[in-house]
Structures are given as structure tokens and as C-alpha cells.
Image (tube, coloured by chain):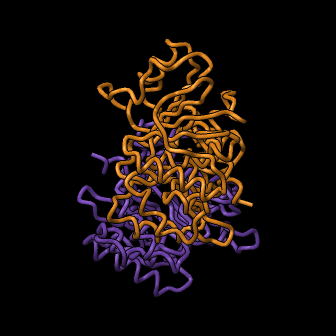
Chain colours: A purple, B orange
């Protein structure tokens, strides 16, 4: 872990959550700031849910606080506190980064989906014109669906235990983008697809697999949102069947790199 | 400058002020925390005077914020916001460190005087039983007078342009300590004395000298509160006349080391 230099001119980025000790943003983003010559340090801010409004006012009053990442339990409440929302964050209804804009206001952004895509691109995964299957229709899935559409994926099948949620997700993406990009469907991978696990199945050893791995084969790429374990049971099975695999760790790396650029861009 | 490591478990110490870019506490104290294996990072918090109460509430609501240093313009207002004051800070009427106590409350402390004394001791300056002359009776002077009494200085003469202020300072110290330690007097150094400049004269090149340097001689130690320039015109003149000299930089070093120990002590 690279050390960071802090002096009186250093700007602050926070990461708010409760608990906060598990947060990995500081050690991931500080070396990026340092590498880009940006005089910014990211620090953990332990913010209990009941105190969010009080802390929010305090953070806003400190001009050298350039923004903060948002983690549990604040992701759903933060959009209501922001002065404005990036259109993507507004659509998804969740914010994971708040930035002080040049006019001093706090604007909410959402980088889950773009971070996932940046991670895929950084690993050389082909997206343009490819079909994709996504398991899951929760918060991360919505963000990823929008980002896959933007990244040039041709068609997306959304599979979810609750079929209605998959249909609602597909409809939302299609309406917002004016396309027929997404459809709700079965969790059945097809030849050459990018297969995305956007559920939390795999976080625990005892979780069932999110899909029938006997259908995975060479030519497919199986990608995870789960970063810990770095290689889930799904990825292990996919690799055994000859599919390319993509760990959730790349989503974190991709997202942190995007967020670093985004924070630096506001310094002017 | 040593780099600091920040992760999710790192505790925060702030330094509040407006402006804040000139603050030297972070780069001075972070290497001390690192050297002691304390997982603490000190960061600058830019807090405009009008927003102090708002920021105060926000800082208090974040349990991993262990306290903060206080610089201009907040030193006089902070005592009113603290939940309690260390007796020394209460006497002096100014706070330069606020610490979150184990019960969660914010208590105000004042380390100017003790920092000055720790700097003298670290440089091997003899204090026990010695007489001292102090020029100045402002905030720093009050803190230093108390600290010199505690450090074993035998008698202190306080010289100030406004004689009444020198008398008030001497009276306050004597009453608080139940001694006749301090007297108001002329700025006339005597053989063997510790001579302290506790005025701001010397900050600027054009400032007059705080006392008649022709009276300085070998056997005296001339000490500064001014750290920049590191060697003031007074110290240069004192050295030329054979007196020992002690830069204001040692007060900063002494204070930062004290404050680091003080913050670590509350972590339990």
C-alpha cells in the first residue's frame, strides 16, 4: 500500500458508511490520486444512519471536502439529500458518489455500472455487438444494464427469480434508451454470450449457484459483481467448463479509477 | 515527508481553520502517528468562522473522528462549544486541541505552553531553579507562563508594552498556582536568565526588536515563540552576543509530539 502525503493544501474525499472499517475505497483510490499528482486524500468517515443529515451539513460547510463515496446504509437516502442528481443516478434511484460541483452544490452520481464496464474493457473482454445474459434485477443489476447498453452490448436477457422485477428492469432500460435492448427471460446462457451474475449469490460458501453451470461452455465470458471471494464458485465452475471468467474485483478497480478521474475533474 | 497509510479502520484527527492551507500540523504529526504504529491520519478541515457550529455537530456525529487541532479564527470561540475544558484551557480562555473523550464528549485542551516547555527540555535547556524574563502578555504568553511555573522555573518577570496586562498576567498565574512566581517588570534581561519572546515581533523583517539586545550576554538562553523565520533577528543578535538561542520551531515540534501522545491516549 502506497503512503499518501497530507499537508494544509490537501483536499479531502470521504467515504461514508456504518460500519466503515470494511471500506476499501481509501487504500484503492489514494494510490491513484498520488499517481496522477492530485493533492487529495480519501479518508473513512463513520456516519451512523441517524446522523447522516447532521454530518451532511458539516461536510457541505467545509470547502476543502470535494465529495465522498457512499456505502451502506446510506445509498438509498443520499439521493434525497443531494442538491441534484446525475440522470443515471436518478434513474437507478441510488447514489454511490457525491461530488461538490464548482458552484458548491452536492451532486449525486452512480458508478456501479460504468465501473463494471470499465473493468471488462480493462481486461480486454469484447462487448461491442455481443449478446449478454444477466442474472439478477436488484440495484447493481439496474446500473449494469444501463452501462451494458451504453457500452455496445447488442441484446440483454434479464433473468430473475421474481420474473416481474426482470420485466420491470427491461422495460425501464428500453424506455429510457428508446431501444428494445433488454428482455426478461430464462437464466439459460447461449453460445458466445457475456454472462453476468448481478445477484449476491456467491458471497457465502453455502449459497446455491445463480445458474445451471452445466450450460456454460467455451466462447462464453462469465463475469461477477462479487469481489470477495475473488473467485466465486460460479467462476470456478465456468473455468472448468472452458468459459472465460472475469472476477468482481475488476469492477472495483474500474470504478475506483473512474471515480478518481471524476473527483479530479471538478477541481478545475 | 513520510507517507501515511489510510484504510477503512483509520481514525481521523482534523485541524480546523480558515484559511487552512498554511496549516503544518498534518505533515508534522502524521509521521509521529506512523512511527508509533497508531492508525490515525491528520487531515486539514477548512472551516469558515460562520460555519463552525454546523461543522462541529457533523464532526461530533462521526465516531472515528478522534478530535482536531484548532487554529485561527476559531481559538477563542471553541471553548464555548466544548462539552468540557481542561482546567488549563479554562484559565487561558483558549483551546488549541479538542479531543473526543472515551464517553464521546468533546473536551478542550491547550498545549501552547506545554509544547514550548517540551521543546526547551528536548533541546537540553535548563529550567529547574532558573529565573526567566518573558516579553509579551498575550494568549501565548499566558500559556507559557503557566507552563514555566510547572516546569520548575524559579521566578518569572513579565514585561509588556501595556504594563497593566503584564500585571494581570502575573496576578492570574500567582493566584491560580498559590505562589508569588510571577511579577510584572521591565524588559531587562539579567545574568543567567531564560529570556522568552512571546510577542509576534520578529514575524516580519521590518519589526522592531522586542528588547534591547545590547543587554544580552553569555549564560542567558534566548527563546522564541516565532517559528518562521526559524532564526529571528532577535536570535541572530543574541547569538552574536554569546547567548544560547532556542528557535520557535522547537515549540511546534514539542507541541506536536505532546498532542500525538494525547490523541493516542484516548483510543484506549
Q: Residue at x 58, y 71 (%)?
A: A18
The picture places residue B260, in percent across and down from the top left corner, at: 64, 47
The picture places residue B8, in percent across and down from the top left corner, at: 61, 57
In terms of depth relative to the viewer, which is nearer, A22 or A150? A22
**Quadrant of res A20:** bottom right
Q: Residue at x 52, y 27 (%)?
A: B189
With A164 as the anchor, is B121 left or right in this view? right
On screen, residue A65 above or below B115: below
**Quadrant of res A189:** bottom right
| Tally of numbered discs | 0
| Res. B25 visible in picture | yes
Quadrant assignment for the C terminus of chain A: top left
Q: Residue at x 35, y 80 (%)?
A: A171
In terms of depth relative to the viewer, which is nearer, A79 or A183? A79
The picture places residue A27, in percent across and down from the top left corner, at: 58, 48
In terms of depth relative to the viewer, which is nearer, A60 or B197? B197
| Res. A121 visible in picture | no
Q: Residue at x 25, y 55 (%)?
A: A102
The picture places residue A235, in percent across and down from the top left corner, at: 66, 58
On screen, residue A172 above or below B108: below
Quadrant assignment for the N terminus of chain A: top right
In terms of depth relative to the viewer, which is nearer, B96 or B32? B96
Amino acid at each position: 500500500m502506497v503512503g499518501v502525503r497530507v499537508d494544509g493544501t490537501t483536499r479531502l474525499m470521504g467515504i461514508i458508511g456504518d460500519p466503515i472499517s470494511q471500506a476499501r475505497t481509501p487504500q484503492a483510490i489514494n494510490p491513484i490520486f498520488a499517481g496522477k499528482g492530485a493533492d487529495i486524500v480519501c479518508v473513512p468517515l463513520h456516519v451512523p444512519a441517524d446522523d447522516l443529515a447532521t454530518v451532511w451539513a458539516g461536510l457541505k460547510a467545509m470547502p476543502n471536502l470535494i465529495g465522498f463515496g457512499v456505502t451502506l446504509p446510506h445509498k438509498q437516502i443520499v439521493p434525497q439529500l443531494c442538491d441534484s442528481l446525475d440522470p443515471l443516478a436518478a434513474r437507478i434511484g441510488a447514489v454511490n458518489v457525491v461530488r461538490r460541483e464548482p458552484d458548491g452544490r452536492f451532486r449525486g452520481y452512480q458508478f456501479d455500472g460504468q465501473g463494471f464496464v470499465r473493468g471488462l474493457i480493462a481486461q480486454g473482454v469484447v462487448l461491442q455487438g455481443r449478446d449478454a445474459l444477466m442474472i439478477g434485477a436488484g440495484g447493481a443489476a439496474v446500473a449494469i444494464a444501463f452501462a451494458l447498453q451504453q457500452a455496445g452490448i447488442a441484446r440483454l436477457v434479464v433473468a430473475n427469480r421474481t420474473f416481474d422485477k426482470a420485466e420491470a428492469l427491461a422495460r425501464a432500460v428500453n424506455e429510457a434508451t428508446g431501444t428494445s435492448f433488454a428482455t426478461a427471460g430464462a437464466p439459460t446462457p447461449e453460445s458466445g454470450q457475456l454472462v453476468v451474475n448481478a445477484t449476491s449469490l456467491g458471497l457465502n460458501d453455502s449459497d446455491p449457484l445463480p445458474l445451471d453451470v452445466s450450460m456454460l461452455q467455451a466462447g462464453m465470458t462469465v463475469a461477477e459483481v462479487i469481489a470477495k471471494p475473488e473467485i466465486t464458485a460460479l467462476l470456478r465452475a465456468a473455468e472448468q467448463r472452458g468459459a472465460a471468467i472475469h472476477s468482481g474485483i475488476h469492477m472495483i478497480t474500474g470504478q475506483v479509477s473512474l471515480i478518481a478521474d471524476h473527483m479530479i475533474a471538478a477541481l478545475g
